[in-house]
């Protein structure tokens, strides 16, 4: 990837545009702290202009024959396969996700696009013949109009995959706002989308922050708003968009538990804790953050975890030889340091302090926090309650499975949780009783495959709509029900219809 200055642009109605209000924010490489470009903070007017373009494109796009529409989804899939490395590098530069994980993220979106290619099968409605004499019923899954989507910084490609292929494949048009902290993936992806020949206005990109989103709330052309982000942002959009009757799909924040039982396969457990707790520098909605360990293996687990964590290297996200890249910004680093202070103040033991990791010379101004481990944590401490979104693990001792389950149930968040055990009783009990949306058994990050829905419960989901799988088809379509009486033109009016009670019950209401 070249080191040219990157000027991020909006893409509206088929054109790349500079933001007319002239407001831009610096775009930084978190691995070095260097300014690498700028990203527009689009005005409400620009945001509504993008919606108007999507609204204009909707009638023709939604009326396009389904195989022709799907052709663009197939081409998008092909383009991602052919440009896998280029797209991964875009994520590794501005979001500074480790290059191996960035490749993994793009790979996951390719799988999501495969799933989206089955939209024609999933969009099929239903019919019921003979609900009365000569009367049939039919359910049609129809597109709705213009959807808008808002992405978090930590999964710029994945969230594109959750929203856009499903929204446009089902016949809607879209306006997408990436995070100002990781806009580069969508700039590159939009270039590839343009090359597919997608009609102008079907997908539009506006960059910006809160004001850009709030402009959609009372825009009558907007049917629905989707967000993946923190819970306060999800609640704010629910309030603003809900007031104007918009549909919403709002995935919020997380605080995920791992429960380690006495029969946990220890090597597998440690390997998964490292990947899940420190992967993406802990900036993952499915990152393990709280680890409840039964007392039989508590000491052994801590010893093994500390030994493994101390040996992990931290450095530039583009360096394949380091284990962990930086966090997203100086502000995020400060917030994580603040939580480390709170953990110490609350009486937890800081068994491994990641505040001053060893760094290569070129990365001294980057935003790094090394692996950090607290032991002797209790559930009421801020480090166990709040989402830290950094590579900080809080280890708690429990007496048995019920102690771990109680902690999970009492936590306000419910995105994911996993158990490490070889015992089928523990496994089934955990699946039944862990109060979260996504459950893992002997897997650290329990991200469901794209064929299945993805989303939490409790404070991790605002409303009830999840992404991907059949849930995505349901969200981006509306069910229309037709009741159809067939009349034989040669036989004339069905004179007996008024006396036919089965017909009367069918048309009543
Ligand atoms: P964030 O909530 O700060 O921002 C998310 C997006 O919302 C950004 O594009 C931002 O510009 C916009 N935004 C911020 N405030 C807004 C407001 N008041 N009104 C409208 N839009 C607003 O989140 P972030 O820091 O970018 O991402 C991290 C968060 O996202 C974490 O809480 C993480 O758990 C969550 N997340 C959740 C999932 C999931 O699947 N549940 C996946 C990834 C990230």
Image (cartoon, rainbow, N blue to C red):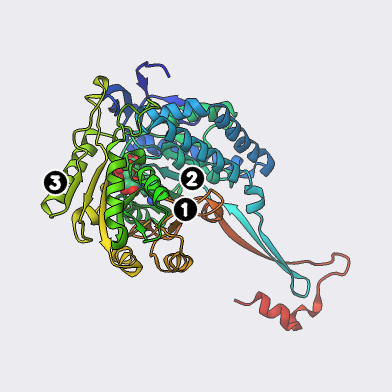
- Asked whether residue 236 appears in the rendered view, the answer is no
Can you tell which quarter of the image residue 88 is in? top left
- Asked whether 61 or 407 is in front, the reply is 407
User: Is 16 rendered above or below residue 144?
Assistant: above
**Ligand 1 under 8 Å from disc 2 Cβ:** no
Give residue 323's position: percent from left, percent from top: 35, 33
SS of the residue at dot 3?
A: helix
Residue pointed to by mark 2: 162
Give residue 112's position: percent from left, percent from top: 54, 43
How many residues crowd mark 1 within 10 Å: few (<14), some (14–19), many (20+)? Answer: many
Q: CA distance from mark 1 to mark 3?
A: 34 Å
Q: Earlier in the sequence, mark 1 or mark 2?
A: 2
From the image, state whether disc 1 or disc 3 is nearer to you: 3
Tag 1 near tag 3, CB within 8 Å: no
Q: Which mark is residue 430?
A: none
Can you tell which quarter of the image residue 504 is in? bottom right
Tag 1 near tag 2, CB within 8 Å: yes
Q: Earlier in the sequence, mark 2 or mark 3?
A: 2
**Ligand 1 under 8 Å from disc 1 Cβ:** yes
Q: CA distance from mark 1 to mark 2?
A: 9 Å
Taking the image as shown, residue 116 lies to the left or right of residue 137, namely left
From the image, state whether disc 2 or disc 3 is nearer to you: 3
Q: CA distance from mark 2 to mark 3?
A: 36 Å
User: Is 177 rendered above or below residue 504?
Assistant: above
Taking the image as shown, residue 183 lies to the left or right of residue 329, namely right
Residue pointed to by mark 3: 341
- Asked whether 364 or 250 is in front, the reply is 364
Residue pointed to by mark 1: 454
Tag 2 near tag 3, CB within 8 Å: no
Quarter of the image containing the C terminus?
bottom right
């Amino acid at each position: 990837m070249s080191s040219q200055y990157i000027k991020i642009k909006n893409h509206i109605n088929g054109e790349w545009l500079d933001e007319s209000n002239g407001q831009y924010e610096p775009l930084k490489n978190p691995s070095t702290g260097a300014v690498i470009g700028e990203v527009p903070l689009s005005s409400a007017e620009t945001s509504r202009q993008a919606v108007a373009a999507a609204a204009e494109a909707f009638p023709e796009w939604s009326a396009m024959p389904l195989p022709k529409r799907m052709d663009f989804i197939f081409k998008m899939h092909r383009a991602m396969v052919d440009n896998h490395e280029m797209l991964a590098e875009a994520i590794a530069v501005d979001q500074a996700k480790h290059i191996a994980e960035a490749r993994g993220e793009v790979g996951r979106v390719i799988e999501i696009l495969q799933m989206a290619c089955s939209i024609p099968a999933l969009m099929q409605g239903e019919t019921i013949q003979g609900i009365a004499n000569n009367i049939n019923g039919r359910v049609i899954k129809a597109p709705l109009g213009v959807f808008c989507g808002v992405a978090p910084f930590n999964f710029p490609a994945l969230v594109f995959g959750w929203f856009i292929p499903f929204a446009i494949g089902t016949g809607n048009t879209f306006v997408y706002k990436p995070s100002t902290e990781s806009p580069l993936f969508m700039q590159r992806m939009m270039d590839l989308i343009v090359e597919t020949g997608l009609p102008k206005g079907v997908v539009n990109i506006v960059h910006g922050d809160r004001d850009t989103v709030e402009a959609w709330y009372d825009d009558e052309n907007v049917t629905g708003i989707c967000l993946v982000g923190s819970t306060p942002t999800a609640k704010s959009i629910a309030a603003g968009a809900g007031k104007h009757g918009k549909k919403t799909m709002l995935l919020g924040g997380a605080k995920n538990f791992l429960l380690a039982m006495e029969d946990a396969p220890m090597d597998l457990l440690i390997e998964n804790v490292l990947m899940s707790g420190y992967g993406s520098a802990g900036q993952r909605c499915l990152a393990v953050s709280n680890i409840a360990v039964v007392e039989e293996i508590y000491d052994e687990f801590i010893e093994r975890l500390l030994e493994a964590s101390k040996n992990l290297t931290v450095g530039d996200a583009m360096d394949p030889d380091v284990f962990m890249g930086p966090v997203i910004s100086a502000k995020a680093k400060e917030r994580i340091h603040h939580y480390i202070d709170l953990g110490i103040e609350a009486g937890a033991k800081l068994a491994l302090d990641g505040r001053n990791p060893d760094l290569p010379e070129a990365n001294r101004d980057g935003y790094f926090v090394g692996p950090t481990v607290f032991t002797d944590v209790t559930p009421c401490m801020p480090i166990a309650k709040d989402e830290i979104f950094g590579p900080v693990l809080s280890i708690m001792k429990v007496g048995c499975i019920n102690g771990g389950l109680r902690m999970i149930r009492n936590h306000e968040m419910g995105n994911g949780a996993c158990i490490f055990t070889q015992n089928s009783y523990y496994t089934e009990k955990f699946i039944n009783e862990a109060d979260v949306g996504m459950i893992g058994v002997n897997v650290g990050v329990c991200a469901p495959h794209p064929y299945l829905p993805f989303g939490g419960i409790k404070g991790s989901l605002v409303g009830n709509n999840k992404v991907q799988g059949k849930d995505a088809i349901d969200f981006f379509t509306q069910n229309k029900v037709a009741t159809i009486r067939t009349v034989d033109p040669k036989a004339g009016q069905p004179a007996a219809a008024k006396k036919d009670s089965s017909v009367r019950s069918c048309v009543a209401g």
